[in-house]
Image (cartoon, grey):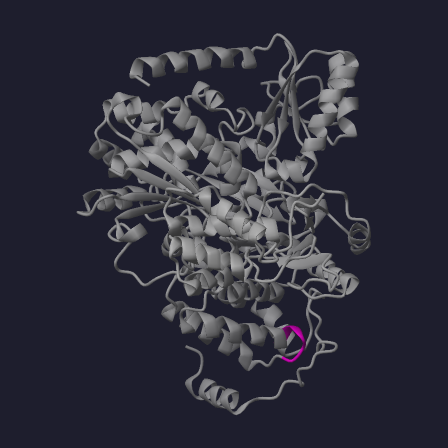
């Protein structure tokens, strides 16, 4: 049921990226770059170099400029993210209401650090310094685009052990 | 659309709205902003619909966004014919069936679940909203439609005076008159800097190059600041109307709304609002037959807090790294694609329809002389009413936090408020008589900023707050200029030592001195404000810092105060460089 694919560099992949770029026909290529990268990442869970190369060729944007953007913005990844994306909020409300403790529990339970993906490709763990706009639920986590909070460390562990069935969101 | 067709559309929309206000069957409002959805509002909505079917009760279910009562989410309002509208809090999918059955079938309004009623007198044991602490000091202008209209309905917006200001500008005013009105109203930038919007508009309008552009900065990005998010989720057309008015006043053919990627719902609703306005003919070519044309593009960000800085946002839209640049030239002279560009905050532009509708005189009658109008605040932390409140500028901090904010949660004691977000400063209890407006909190080393306030109780360590802010600024520094990149890193190292019981008394002076240097020599607002929380912590809570460095003790019991377990770092020893700095500190003293 996964909507995402693994990038293999096949012709089908190239066609898919081209189709994404077709959607920006007539628009300014530079203004379209970030939205296009979002679309590609939604599909592959990262921005594959091969996809960036297709953008570079079609829109005449140097690879170095695309790479500059991909590495600057925290949304974009150069390695595939896990199938489950867990954000632990350490925004200004959550940080002081138990966010760091949830973060430690998540790191220990998944045996990875912030920004890392488990070797089996199941989980990516991230620390959110921005705001989910749900400070009334602090301390909270966001799992696959759904907010859970307020959570205790035990509740977080059982959430990780039994992640709710979800639909893939449209967010990047 | 001709002016005649517009007036007819407006008349019909208002007529249909009357049936909402004077319903023949029960109306159920369900709040669906991101705060409500996080609390399970989508499941509540499902439960309401299935309960209505089960009970066989006919009712109108209306989707809206919250009033700002975030702490009560999921919020549901019910209005029965002949009864006032009542706001209920904590209506989860489990509670909803019981509530509907009680009130709609058994005629029990359930005061135990109610927050307030929209009536002048108490209604069957439910307090009137206007008497609640949360509401009674509020002056709702920008949030006026939130909680009433469906944010996805342009008709709801038009029925509530929406786009009347735009029509007035286009049909009755010259662009110069619009600029003049906004200048006279002295609408100051709500993103935090407080620069008068009218002056920005005027200088862009008078710039020689064309085309000119308008950018809405909706890249809020800061932890604990969510007022722009809610304004977009609750009333996106209000912003859009302000944006089109700006386009007309400045003589611009195109506007951009730059929205942070962590705001998917705000993005979706803004895109929908643009499409609806296009379909109705309020965007596009020849709007209302006046020959004025305007296009709006909604552009997503991609993370990186710094790309919400005004000059950085321009690069972000251009598909480049969103890093600030040196000024001059100012954006009004050379901004997007090198053209004159106005960059305004969401809240700033959302004020414009109200300024045009009610006039500059009305606007300046609100708030204070130097800061006219209202301000939307987002309150979070150890406070009772976590959410949004809109008060006139000049309200005291005590009124804002202890009346509209409901005071401290669970009887805990107030310690400090971090005003102005991560770039703001701490304000202790004895300074709560300060007023919230541009330029007053600065006297105590803080600022109003964009109005995102975080409230701390006595269990919070103020050194930890300064550490947290420094960590955020270090992580979000773009690295372009040295004072910010190196300065915040070295300050963070000092804080790491202090938190782990290895600080020294000289750290206090070094933190203060390096803060001043970072403020003085950084390129953009991030660096210039990064040390503000540190300086305010030293100013108001130096005792607490001294306890950390001298007694190796965290009075709040928060900091670890021992070397980090498993840390590969050797216990702290001074490097030659630090020894030199130490000697300098001793000879020069604190500046």
Give the residue at the far left of this rendering.
B208
Identify which residue is drawn at 58% across, 50% down: A12
Looking at the image, which is closer to me, B490 or B508?
Answer: B490
Q: Is residue B562 magenta-colored?
A: no
The boundaries of the magenta stretch are: B498-502
From what the image shows, is residue B160 above or below residue B578?
above
Q: Quadrant of the N terminus of chain B?
A: top left
Q: Quadrant of the C terminus of chain B?
A: bottom left
Residue B393 drawn at (x, y percent):
43, 41
User: Is B48 on the left or on the right of B328, as rendered?
Assistant: right
User: Is B124 on the left or on the right of B62, as rendered?
Assistant: right
Looking at the image, which is closer to me, B61 or A25?
Answer: A25
Residue B108 drawn at (x, y percent):
76, 16
- How many dots with numbers? 0
Residue B419 drawn at (x, y percent):
51, 53
Which quadrant of the figure has residue B5? top left
* Residue B101 appears in the rendering: yes
Residue B567 drawn at (x, y percent):
70, 78
Give the residue at the far front of this rendering.
A11
User: Predominant secondary structure in magenta?
Assistant: loop
Identify which residue is drawn at 66% across, 13% down: B26
From what the image shows, is residue B232 above or below residue B442?
above
Identify which residue is drawn at 41% across, 53% down: A58
Looking at the image, which is closer to me, B459 or A94?
Answer: A94
* Residue B442 appears in the rendering: no
From what the image shows, is residue B439 above or below residue B137?
below
Which quadrant of the figure has residue B366? top left
């Amino acid at each position: 049921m996964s909507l995402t694919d693994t990038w293999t560099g096949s012709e089908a992949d190239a066609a898919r990226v081209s189709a994404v770029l077709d959607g920006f026909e007539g628009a300014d290529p530079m203004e379209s770059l970030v939205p296009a990268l979002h679309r590609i990442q939604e599909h592959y869970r990262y921005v594959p170099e091969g996809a960036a190369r297709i953008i570079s060729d079609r829109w005449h944007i140097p690879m170095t400029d695309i790479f500059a953007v991909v590495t600057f913005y925290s949304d974009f990844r150069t390695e595939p993210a896990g199938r489950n994306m867990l954000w632990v909020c350490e925004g200004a409300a959550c940080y002081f209401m138990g966010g760091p403790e949830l973060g430690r529990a998540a790191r220990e339970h998944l045996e990875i650090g912030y920004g890392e993906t488990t070797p089996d490709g199941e989980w990516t763990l991230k620390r959110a310094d921005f705001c989910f706009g749900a400070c009334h639920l602090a301390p909270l986590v966001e799992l696959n685009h759904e907010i859970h909070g307020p959570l205790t460390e035990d509740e977080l562990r059982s959430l990780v052990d039994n992640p709710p069935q979800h639909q893939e969101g449209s967010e990047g | 659309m001709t002016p005649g067709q517009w007036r007819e559309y407006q008349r019909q929309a208002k007529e249909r709205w009357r049936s909402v206000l004077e319903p023949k069957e029960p109306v159920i409002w369900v709040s669906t902003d991101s705060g409500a959805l996080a609390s399970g509002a989508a499941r509540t909505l499902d439960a309401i619909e299935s309960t209505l079917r089960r009970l066989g009760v006919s009712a109108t279910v209306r989707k809206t966004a919250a009033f700002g009562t975030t702490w009560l989410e999921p919020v549901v309002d019910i209005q029965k014919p002949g009864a006032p509208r009542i706001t209920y809090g904590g209506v989860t999918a489990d509670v909803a069936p019981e509530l509907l059955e009680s009130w709609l079938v058994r005629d029990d309004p359930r005061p135990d679940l109610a927050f307030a009623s929209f009536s002048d007198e108490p209604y069957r044991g439910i307090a009137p909203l206007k008497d609640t602490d949360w509401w009674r000091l509020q002056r709702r202008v920008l949030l006026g439609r939130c909680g009433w209209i469906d944010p996805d309905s342009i008709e709801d917006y038009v029925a509530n005076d929406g786009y009347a200001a735009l029509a007035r500008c286009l049909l009755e005013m010259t662009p110069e008159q619009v600029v003049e009105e906004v200048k006279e109203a002295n609408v100051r930038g709500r993103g935090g800097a407080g620069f008068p919007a009218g002056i920005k508009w005027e200088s862009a309008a008078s710039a020689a190059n064309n085309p000119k552009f308008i950018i809405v900065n909706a890249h809020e990005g800061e932890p604990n600041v969510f007022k722009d998010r809610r304004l977009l989720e609750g009333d996106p057309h209000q912003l859009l109307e302000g944006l089109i008015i700006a386009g007309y006043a400045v003589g611009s053919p195109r506007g951009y709304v730059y929205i942070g990627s962590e705001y998917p719902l705000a993005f979706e609703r803004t895109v929908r609002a643009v499409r609806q306005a296009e379909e109705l003919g309020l965007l596009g070519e020849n709007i209302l037959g006046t020959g004025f044309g305007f296009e709006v593009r909604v552009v997503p960000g991609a993370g990186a807090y710094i790309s919400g800085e005004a000059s950085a946002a321009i690069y972000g839209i251009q598909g480049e790294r969103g890093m600030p640049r040196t000024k001059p030239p100012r954006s009004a002279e050379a901004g997007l694609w090198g053209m004159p560009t106005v960059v305004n905050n969401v809240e700033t532009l959302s004020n414009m329809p109200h300024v045009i509708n009610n006039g500059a005189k009305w606007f300046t009658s609100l708030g204070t002389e130097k800061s006219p109008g209202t301000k939307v605040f987002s309150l979070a932390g150890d406070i009772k009413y976590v959410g949004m409140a809109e008060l006139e500028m000049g309200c005291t901090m005590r009124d804002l936090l202890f009346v509209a904010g409901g005071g401290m949660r669970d009887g805990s004691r107030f310690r400090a408020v971090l005003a102005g977000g991560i770039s703001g400063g701490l304000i202790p209890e004895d300074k709560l008589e300060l007023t919230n407006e541009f330029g007053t909190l600065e006297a105590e080393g803080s600022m109003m900023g964009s109005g995102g306030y975080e409230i701390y109780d006595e269990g919070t360590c103020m050194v930890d707050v300064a550490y947290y802010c420094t960590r955020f600024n270090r992580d979000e520094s773009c690295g372009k200029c040295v004072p910010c990149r190196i300065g915040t890193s070295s300050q963070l190292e000092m804080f790491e030592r202090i938190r782990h019981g290895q600080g020294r008394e000289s750290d206090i002076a070094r933190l203060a001195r390096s803060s001043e240097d970072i403020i003085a020599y950084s390129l953009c607002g991030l660096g210039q404000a990064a040390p503000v929380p540190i300086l305010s912590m030293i100013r108001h809570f130096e005792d607490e810092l001294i306890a950390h460095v001298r007694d190796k003790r965290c009075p709040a019991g928060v900091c670890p105060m021992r070397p980090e377990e498993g840390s590969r770092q050797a216990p702290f020893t001074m490097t030659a460089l630090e020894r030199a700095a130490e000697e300098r500190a001793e000879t020069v003293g604190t500046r």
